[in-house]
Amino acid sequence: MASERAAVEYEFYIPAAVWEHGATRAFLAWLTSEVEGATVFKGAVGAWEGQVERTHVVRVLAGADEATSGLIAARAGELMRAWGESPQTRQETLMFTKRTAVVVTVEFGG
């Protein structure tokens, strides 16, 4: 039997240069504890403002409520501030996308 529910899909584009940063690790640990599931696509090559960079994409499904959305945005802001504490990890932008999704689950009826 299949069931459906509303969700929000987020994709975070995290430059490889800051992937091992402690704040990145803390953000991802928090994020994955707050959502139903996450998928990581490591080693993508992207371009931003004419510069090519290696990027890791983290896709998560979260509840479709404003509180969750606001909390994720606030935590992303904290991540940017942490990266900005050092010239070696400072980033101009953290980009993430947010899309409305319908999660469909099918369970084995055995």
Image (cartoon, rainbow, N blue to C red):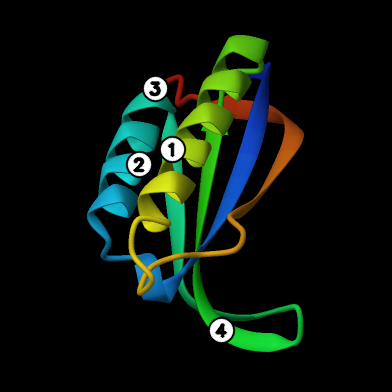
Q: Which residue is mark 1?
A: 78
Residue 95: x %, y % from top left: 64, 55
Residue at the outermost left position: 22
Instruction: Determine the secondary structure under disc 3.
Output: loop
Q: Is residue 34 left or right of residue 25?
A: right
Front residue of 59 and 19:
19
The residue mark sitting in front, 3 or 4, is 4
Q: Which residue is mark 2?
A: 27
The answer to whether the residue labelled 3 contacts the one labelled 2, judged by CB atoms less than 8 Å apart, is: no
Front residue of 16 and 91:
91
Q: Earlier in the sequence, mark 2 or mark 4?
A: 2
Mark 1 → mark 2, Cα distance in angstroms: 9 Å
Residue at 36%, 36% in the rendered image: 32
Q: Is residue 88 above or below residue 23?
A: below
Tell me how many marks there are: 4
In which quadrant will I find the C terminus?
A: top left
Instruction: Determine the secondary structure under disc 1.
Output: helix
Mark 1 → mark 3, Cα distance in angstroms: 46 Å
Residue at 62%, 59% in the rendered image: 93
Mark 3 → mark 2, Cα distance in angstroms: 39 Å
Mark 2 → mark 4, Cα distance in angstroms: 21 Å
Instruction: Determine the secondary structure under disc 2.
Output: helix
Residue 83: x %, y % from top left: 39, 56
Q: Is residue 15 left or right of residue 1?
A: left
Q: Is residue 71 above or below residue 94?
A: above
Three-letter amino acid code at the position of disc 2:
Phe
Q: Earlier in the sequence, mark 1 or mark 4?
A: 4
Instruction: Determine the secondary structure under disc 4.
Output: strand
Q: Earlier in the sequence, mark 1 or mark 2?
A: 2
